[in-house]
Amino acid sequence: MAGDGTAGQGITPEGFLAVIWTLAALATVLLGGRILVRHVLHGSYHADDAFAILAWALMIATIALATAVNPLSYRLTSVLVGDAPMPPMEEWMDMNLELRRYNVAGQSLFWASIFAVKFSFMFLYRLVVQSVQQYRKVWYIAMLFITISLGVCLIGVYGQCIEAGNLFDLQACSTPRVADYSAKMIWVVFAFNVASDLIVVLILVPIIWNLNMQTKQKLAFLGVCSLAIITIAFEVVRTVKLSQLNFNLTNLYSYLELLVAVIISTLPTFSFAISNTEKSREYRRLLWSRITLASYRSNNGSNHSVELRDHTDNPGFKRTASSVQDSASGHNQA
């Protein structure tokens, strides 16, 4: 509805920012919990933690940039949908050029953060498969494809005008040839991004399914990691709407995809909180005792104080439920 302050997008600028910053706050809390769990249960961190923190930092930068460009974005779309009069042509071109600069930076941060999440999952899986040669080969192939996919997505950003030198030349970027190229490139980027998402999910299935654990435990762990499929749904909607005038809704779906991805990347660390295995119960007791500075008695009857490390490293890959549990919650694998 014209004049309702939504620029025809169905959401106000304030509502748009409220949604993305609320989810960013949730992601921040969960990342803090992940770091706390890793520190308390083992006291060390791995490459998957580094990529999770990197993904969060890039996400915050992306959201901050979205906040800065939000007024300009809504002003421009208000003109496009007829809620505001067309400004003088020179001013209109300046608005579009400024928005293009913001968008290029934002898209670069977006893809870097999205793929940092994927790398975080992949390095978590590496803790599980590092001692099984056949799985290591699959892991390296998957990592190669995911890295190539990142490159394709960045080409979609910097090559959207075919030649990188024309990226900020609005006239050169407005030709029919560029329009045809962009329409095709959108789906190429979509295909590589979704394929890399599916690889992150599917590579875990044979690993978990060959472990010596109950079926419901396998399904529960796979369920947590398979939440990454949610991001595919946002990617589908975002890609479809790229050809429409709903620029802010397109951006909203992009940010939701990113925010949900970062949130999901923290969840495997908390798998012990919902599992009913003895190892998980032991982790919960240990975590609570160290947070409350208390001592607890393990099932073998021995006391453990918060200053002592009661968990020993399991060398190699062990085909048990605890090997996956340890990797997810921060237990080191030698």
Image: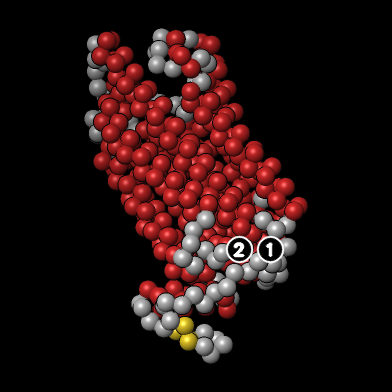
> Image quadrant for the N terminus?
top left
How packed mark 2 is, by other alpha carbons closer than 10 Å (few <14, some 14-19, many 20 or more), is some
15 lies left or right of 175? left
> Which picture quadrant has residue 20?
top left
Residue 303: where, in percent of width, then height?
48, 87
Pick whichever, 62 or 233, lies toward us: 62
Q: Secondary structure at mark 1?
A: loop
How packed mark 1 is, by other alpha carbons closer than 10 Å (few <14, some 14-19, many 20 or more), is some
Question: Decide: marks 1, 2 in contact (CB < 8 A)?
Answer: yes
- What residue appears at the point 61 percent right and 48 percent down from the top-left corner? 200
Pick whichever, 240 or 152, lies toward us: 152
115 lies left or right of 61? right
How far apart, in angstroms, are the residues tagged by discs 1 and 2? 8 Å
- What residue appears at the point 47 percent right and 56 percent down from the top-left corner? 266
The answer to whether residue 36 is above or below residue 281 is: above
Question: What residue type is disc 2 on?
Answer: Gln
- What residue appears at the point 43 percent right and 32 percent down from the top-left corner? 107
Residue 164: where, in percent of width, then height?
48, 17
Residue 260 visible in the picture: no
> For residue 317, which numbered disc appears in the image?
1
The answer to whether residue 243 is above or below residue 117 is: above
Residue 157: where, in percent of width, then height?
48, 26
> Image quadrant for the C terminus?
bottom right
What residue would you read off at disc 2?
A: 333
